[in-house]
Image: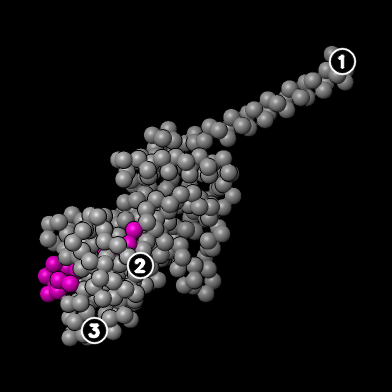
Amino acid sequence: MKTNRKQFTTLAIAALAMGLGSAAWAQGAYPTKTVTMVVPTAAGGTTDLSARMVAQALAPVLGQSVVVDNKGGGNGNIAASIVKRAEADGYTLLMQYSGYHVISPHLTKVAQWAQSDFQPIANVISAPQIIVVRADLPVKTLPELIAYAKANPGKLNYASSGNGSLQHVTGAMLEQQGGIKMVHVPYKGPALQDLLGGQVDLTFGTAPPFMPHIASGKLRVLAVTGKQRLPSLPDVPTTAEAGYPKVDATSWFAVFAPAGVSKAVVDKLTADIRTVVQSPTFQ
C-alpha cells in the first residue's frame, strides 16, 4: 500500500503522540514495584526507627511495599555507597543521619562518596540529642557528671554509633567544655542494650529509643543538647541551663535518592513523604 506525504505526516504525528503518552504514563505510574529504604545503622536507634515509621506509613500512599534494609557500619559509608551505586529510578532510597552525611565523607583520605552523589527528597525529623546515663551511675545532673568525671579521670566511658558520628562529636564537645576526659567506645550502631547492661556509662542520642527505659527508671537523662527543653521531657534542663551552652548538637534524619532521579519522581516522593510526616499519626 502506498502512503502519500500527507498520510505519512499524520501517521508520524499520531505515533509520536502515542509515544509521548506512553512515556508520560510510565513516569506517572511510579512506583510499580517495591521501594527499598537503606538504613546506615543496625536495627534500633532513631535512624532505623525513622525509616520504619516512614516505610510503614508511606507504603499505602505509594500503593507499593516499602522495605527497610539495614546496612550498618563504616560510619554510614556502607549504606551510602550502596545507594550511590543504585539505579537512579527512585526504587532505592537512603534514610540518612546528619552526623554521617556531614562528617563521614571527610574521615578518609579517599572519600567513598560525596554529598553531590545524592538527591535530597525530604527531611523527616530534626531533634536535639539527650545525655543518658545508666541508672546506677551516681549522678543525677550534668554538673554532677562533670564532677564525677573529674574525680575519676579516665573511668567514664561513652558510646557512639561510630568514629566521627554526631554522638562522638557531642562527647568530644562535652569533654572540651567540661574539662574532662572520657573513654570513647564506638559501635556500628545504637549502643542501647550495652548501656542498659552496664557495659557503657553514658551515651547521646535523640529521645525516642530511650523513652521507655527512662520511664521505667532503667536509664537516667541528664540534659537536652538543644536550645529548648523537649515537650516529652519537660523537667529535663538543656545543656545551656545546666551551665554548658556550647554543648549544642541537633540531629536530622532525611530521605535521599541517588543523584539523577527524575524530577517527577523526586516531586512525588517529596510530596508523599511530607504528607506522611505531617499526619497526626506520625506526629
Circle 1 residue: 2
How dense is the environment of label 2, judged by Cα within 10 Å: few (below 14), some, or many (20 and up)?
A: many
Which residue position holds label 2?
A: 249
Which x, y percent locates residue 266?
53, 44
Amino acid type at image mark 2? Ala
Q: Are marks 3 and 2 in contact (CB under 8 Å)?
A: no
Q: Is residue 268 left or right of residue 132?
A: right
Q: Dot 1 surroundings within 10 Å: few (below 14), some, or many (20 or more)? A: few
Q: Amino acid at mark 3?
A: Gly
Front position in the image: 241 or 78: 241
Q: Nearer the viewer, residue 40 or 138?
A: 138
Reading the image, the residue beneath label 3 is 154
Let me know if residue 139 is in the magenta part. Answer: yes
Tell me the SS state at disc 3.
loop
Question: Label 1's element?
Answer: loop
Q: Quadrant of residue 155?
A: bottom left
- The C terminus appears in which quarter of the rendering? top left
Q: Position of residue 156 (x, y in %)?
A: 22, 78
Give the Cα separation between the discs numbered 3 and 2.
23 Å
Q: Is residue 259 visible?
A: yes
Mark 2–mark 1 Cα distance, whole angstroms, equals 75 Å
State how far apart marks 3 and 1 are (Cα).
92 Å
The N terminus lies in quadrant: top right
Identify which residue is drawn at 53% across, 32% down: 29
Q: Earlier in the sequence, mark 3 or mark 2?
A: 3
The span shown in magenta is 127-141
Colour option used: one colour
Task: Give the number of the mark in front: 3 or 1.
Answer: 3
Residue 163 lies within the magenta run: no
